DNA sequence: GGTTGCGTTGGAAGCGCTTCCATGTAACCA
DNA sequence: TGGTTACATGGAAGCGCTTCCAACGCAACC
């Protein structure tokens, strides 16, 4: 029986042992080290990929760790000066119930964190002195945070960015350029979508823009303009209506939109598109026959009962990139300041070429 | 200058010092102890409310701690055998975008945690081996978890309940009685709401029930029955339609509902109610003139453009109770196995007494 | 006035990990 | 072959906290 065989056998033993005990709780680094016949220091180095460990030793340690079902205690890890592998995501204090973008992003982040084996803390921007978020960081619970650009402008965001806490922003920052940013491509994708409406023989497309202090809203509006420009069309002011990204604001702008007499509407996000849709339906306007409709985000879920033309944000990819970037940042690796992820332009039933529409 | 005065002065000095330094990071227990002229042990006892500390000493320590802006390092606290003051909330792996209940609950928990100065980790029930959640616990990151009854039946929930992890369930468990449960009162409140429809001169009210393997769905259906019973009315099977709590299922059941020819519908949650509403609108049925509509949960937000009669879950209270219960559980204090929170029955515009309705 | 007993306090160990530093060993050059 | 370098490893310190235990002082008691 070779040494290898002996190891194999032993490992098998350990494994079944671990399985028997339902969950082999509290296997410490010490246990792994002892079983492997090395010191804690070496075991630590081996498992963390530090160099200065002989190849076979590393393998053996890794094997035994796995067999024992060893999971490093993150608390201890953190305390010892390492990192927790826990990141934070900040939730604003206002309701997110109607904010499908925030929800999708949050879920994306949760998925990404899970996938990368990072813990995820939900930080709450409490109404009180903006210390809350800072505190959670200094409490030593998280190594860094992901924040949504939606929150930009709030005091704690700036605090956070000023403090040297590793931070990744999903969405652009209107003023600062020293921030690590992940964003979806807004301009061209909007232009493509609007272009699709124009090419589907829309005579007059108007848009309900988002709040223009937000970069994404601005870019989407630019995209709207760009699509016209490319086709040699001009955009008059009347065709630009201003909303605030909420569903209610979509609904509230129905009349304003109809006054512009468009046969196509590009809402700067899906929420507003759904608000518009309800208004159109109530007024007996059919989508897409009477008026085509497009949104942005891809957050209108099936329950809404429409396959809305939209620019679908790749939330999972966006989130994964954000979390990966953040962990790289935490490890002190160099990362690009800005990363753009391409979304998918989806033409749902709400935008169809006229000739493709079934007889009315 | 008395000793007291000296202390006051010193404290003022410290305070302004702390404020100057923007955020007085890394003030350790040691600092507090030294400044207070006591040992770390005593300082710890004082700040944690352990007894065996003289009154004036405790006061002094507390004062100095505050002045210095001391925040205990939760990581260290945890490692030393204390608790982290971090709890977990488990997010299912399926989309929550359309699940307004889950979102509201989560946000409630986040608020409650923030208010009670508990950290909140978002645990993800990843599709993989159900170890994920367990792991996060054994990683030593959280002291306990809150889970939504929605997840009951999934393997990890049972695992969790079996393992001696402090757990609080929001919503009832259909089978186990050894679980700490916080729930909203479902039965009577449903009955009250349905009763309001009946009393508003509805001739025939039917219901779209939720999935009956869920306790809340069952109770709401019972409430529906109860309301009829009280009034000496009978409920025929045709007036009970079965949905699955999703908006899509509400919409999908529109025809089934209309076939029952009701002039009032009680959907077992708001999502289904909104699905129904869309269907009704599409078919030209006006709510509430042609048909009254009620839901449950109170999660239909203003953006939906209807003030829906509903039973409004007190999410904040529910969550606060849950988190408080959990922390008590963690501290080892005795807590009642079951707690019921009373919701508020809200009659929106979708349920009105016939005579109160404006002329059609 | 000596003793018991209680309430307060400080010293020290230890939670599980990382990492510095010193030691040991093998490989290298002259 | 001696001396040097490079690498692999173990010992030990320490992260900030809690808590056990022993020591202390003090009041009340006989």
Image (cartoon, coloured by chain):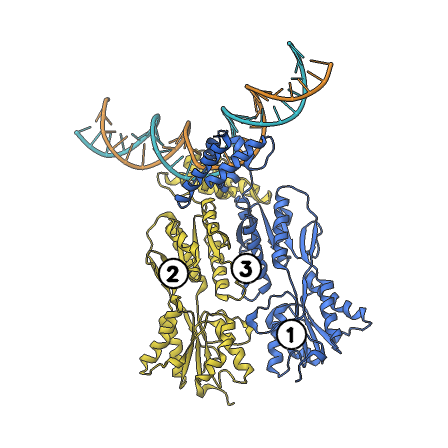
Chain colours: A blue, B yellow, C orange, D cyan
Q: Position of residue A272 (x, y in %)?
A: 63, 71
Dividing the picture into quarters, in which one does residue B341 lie? bottom left
Circle 1: element type: loop
Dividing the picture into quarters, in which one does residue B184 lie? bottom left
Query: In this rendering, does residue B73 appear at all?
Result: no
Q: Position of residue A344 (x, y in %)?
A: 67, 63
Residue tagged by mark 1?
Answer: A349
Circle 3: element type: loop
* Few, some or many residues within 10 Å of mark 3 (<14, 14–19, 20+): some
Judge by depth and name the residue closer to the eye, A222 or A286: A286
**In the rendered image, residues at marks 3 and 1 fall on the same chain:** yes
Q: Position of residue B267 (x, y in %)?
A: 45, 75
Residue at position x 45%, y 47% from top?
B137
* Few, some or many residues within 10 Å of mark 1 (<14, 14–19, 20+): some
Q: Which mark is residue A179?
A: none
- Asked if residue A333 lies left or right of residue A61, the reply is right
- Work out whether B37 lies above or below B300: above
- Work out whether A257 lies above or below D28: below
Residue tagged by mark 2?
Answer: B182
Q: Nearer the viewer, mark 1 or mark 2?
A: 1
Which chain letter goes with mark 3? A
Q: Nearer the viewer, mark 2 or mark 3?
A: 2
Marks 3 and 1, how far apart in space? 36 Å
Judge by depth and name the residue closer to the eye, A306 or C26: C26
Marks 2 and 3, how far apart in space? 24 Å
Q: Which mark is residue A93?
A: 3
Q: Nearer the viewer, mark 3 or mark 1?
A: 1
Query: In this rendering, does residue B84 appear at all?
Result: yes
Residue at position x 56%, y 70% from top?
A302
Which chain letter goes with mark 2? B
Q: Position of residue A160 (x, y in %)?
A: 61, 49
Locate the C terminus of chain A and report the quarter of the image it occupies.
bottom right
């Amino acid at each position: 029986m070779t040494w290898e065989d002996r190891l194999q056998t032993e490992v098998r033993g350990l494994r079944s042992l671990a399985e028997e005990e339902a969950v082999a709780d509290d296997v410490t680094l010490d246990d792994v080290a002892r079983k492997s016949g090395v010191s804690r220091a070496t075991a630590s180095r081996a498992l963390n990929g530090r160099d200065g460990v002989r190849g076979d030793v590393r393998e053996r340690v890794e094997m035994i760790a796995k067999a024992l079902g060893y999971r490093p205690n993150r608390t201890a890890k953190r305390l010892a000066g390492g990192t927790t592998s826990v990141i934070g995501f900040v939730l604003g204090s206002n309701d997110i119930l109607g904010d499908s973008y925030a929800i999708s992003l949050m879920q994306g982040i949760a998925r990404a964190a899970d996938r990368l084996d990072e813990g995820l803390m939900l930080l709450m921007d409490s109404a009180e002195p903006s210390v809350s978020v800072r505190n959670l960081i200094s409490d030593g619970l998280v190594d860094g945070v992901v924040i949504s650009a939606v929150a930009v402008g709030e005091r704690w965001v700036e605090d956070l960015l000023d403090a040297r806490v590793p931070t990744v922003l999903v969405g652009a920052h209107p003023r600062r350029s020293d921030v690590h940013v992940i964003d979806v491509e807004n301009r061209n994708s909007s232009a493509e979508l609007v272009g699709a409406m124009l090419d589907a023989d829309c005579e007059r497309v108007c848009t309900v823009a988002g709040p223009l202090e937000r970069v994404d809203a601005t870019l989407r509006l630019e995209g709207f303009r760009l699509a016209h420009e490319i086709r040699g069309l001009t955009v008059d002011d009347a065709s630009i209506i201003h909303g605030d990204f909420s569903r209610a604001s979509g609904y509230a702008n129905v009349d304003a939109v109809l006054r512009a007499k468009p046969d196509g509407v590009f809402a700067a996000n899906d929420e507003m598109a759904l608000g518009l849709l309800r208004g159109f339906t109530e007024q007996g306007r059919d989508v897409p026959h009477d008026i085509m409709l497009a949104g942005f985000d891809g957050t209108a879920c099936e329950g809404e009962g429409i396959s809305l033309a939209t620019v679908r944000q790749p939330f999972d990819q966006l989130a994964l990139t954000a979390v990966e970037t953040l962990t790289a940042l935490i490890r002190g690796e160099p990362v690009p300041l800005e990363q753009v992820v391409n979304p998918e332009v989806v033409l749902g039933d709400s935008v169809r070429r006229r000739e493709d529409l079934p007889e009315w």
